[in-house]
Amino acid sequence: MNTALVILAAGMGTRMQSDLPKVLHEIAGAPMLAHAIASGLRLEPSRVTVVAGHGAEAVGQAARDRFPFAEIVLQEEQNGTAHAVAQAREGLSDFEGNVLVLYGDTPFIRPETLDAMQRARADHDVVVLGFEAADPGRYGRLVMDGARLDRIVEFKDASDEERRITLCNSGVICADRKVLFDLVAAVDNDNAAGEYYLTDIVGLARAQGLSAGAVTCDEAETMGINSRAQLAEAEAAFQARARAEALDNGVTLMAPETVFLAHDTVIGRDSVVEPNVVFGPEVTVESGSRIRAFSHLEGCHVSRGGVIGPYARLRPGAELAEDVRIGNFVEIKASRVDRGSKINHLSYIGDAEIGEDTNIGAGTVTCNYDGVSKHVTRIGARAFIGSDTMLVAPVSIGDDAMTGSGSVITRDVEPGALALGRAQQVNKPGLARKLFEMLKSRAKTPGKGS
């Protein structure tokens, strides 16, 4: 079934109290707009159109960054949802098939629900997504005529009887492209708000002898986000679902409520995640790994059997092979660490390549930045890097090589060699005692010390 998505993302979001367009506020590390588009992409649409308005340049860029094929159209004045949809008409003039209208601030509609709307199109010219509301509040109401949808009434325009209806409108609509845009063109703004309501197309369709129907979903799917409080609720809802899914997939979360997952986190079965771990975007953890407490991971890959943390930080580009150990207060960035290697204490490894079964001693730093450019450190297999070694890139350490503790390494070290790069130690007999006596004397003298 040929499908096009139209994503409405033009609103300012005044209640967010933000300079950032509302649809670019993030849930689980991705803009809510991206969540909305991703749900629709499960239907394999041939076209995606984003209707932007407030902050259009930023909205368009965010959409194209994740979905390069998205088309961006501008709604210069926000005159209602039907007016917004109308902006997509010209760009879809050559399209034949169903158009699904979604909302950039309603990110949680499941692909299965959208698929049900597509299937309902076999029986109806226009299909609307509705939900039974625990508290209907100011939602628009779906007025049914048996199995058919008669009309949608906005709360402002509803009678007392209509306001008692609990079947509410999500705003999501599916219709044939020609039918949709012909109906949108007939919408007027004769209502309490003076806006062009997309919901009016249902009454117009019925007046023209067309059929309208409703598909229902759980109310949680239709959560709209208009304020910081609702954004926080949406984040909590996402995390609850993501944690439950991880548990169902065989991942142990020792304290689930303290683990935060991104929209694309992948964790393999029989992995263990200890308390207070944060996953940023683009993280894959393979099966049988352990992520220890208070670690932060983003843009990285942990292979099978890895042990990370506690208090570790994996930054974008960290690629860890099987059975790698990354310990407490270790930071890895844009580096590959090969099978079985260990970096267990207080180290920074950036822009580096580390061979298998190598041990990186405590306090080691790859000095990768010269103030202008980044440079690469290469460490071979089975090497031993002594504690507190500074590796000044670009530099290479060969297989089976060793560096002495406290060394500053500025030149390549051949395989099997021991490198020492530190000043010679000098001992001064008796000088410590004299210094202590002098310091104590000064401390007793008025006006000396502090």
Image (cartoon, helix red, strand yellow):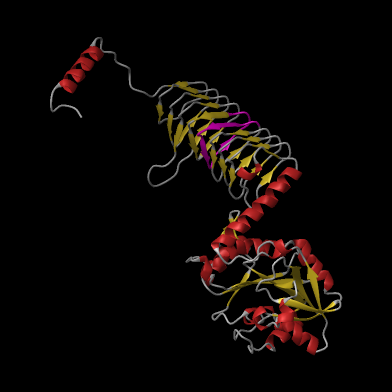
Closest to the observer, 309 or 418: 309
Above or below 4: residue 316:
above
Closest to the observer, 46 or 374: 46
Q: Residue at x 65, y 61 (%)?
A: 35
Residue 94 seen in the figure:
no
Task: Give the quarter of the figure containing the N terminus.
Answer: bottom right
Q: Residue furthest top?
A: 429
Closest to the observer, 345 or 449: 449
Q: Residue at x 82, y 74 (%)?
A: 121
Q: Tell me the quarter of the picture where residue 251 sits.
A: top right
Above or below 28: residue 201:
below
Q: Residue at x 72, y 86 (%)?
A: 182
Give x and y (percent) for residue 87.
Answer: 62, 80
Closest to the observer, 336 or 255: 255
Give x and y (percent) for residue 350.
Answer: 49, 39
Give x and y (percent) for residue 72.
Answer: 60, 72
Residue 106 seen in the figure:
yes
Q: Which residues are magenta?
A: 323-341
Q: Residue furthest left?
A: 446
Task: Give the quarter of the figure containing the C terminus.
Answer: top left
- Residue 47 in the magenta stretch? The answer is no
Q: Residue furthest front?
A: 160
Above or below 432: residue 298:
below
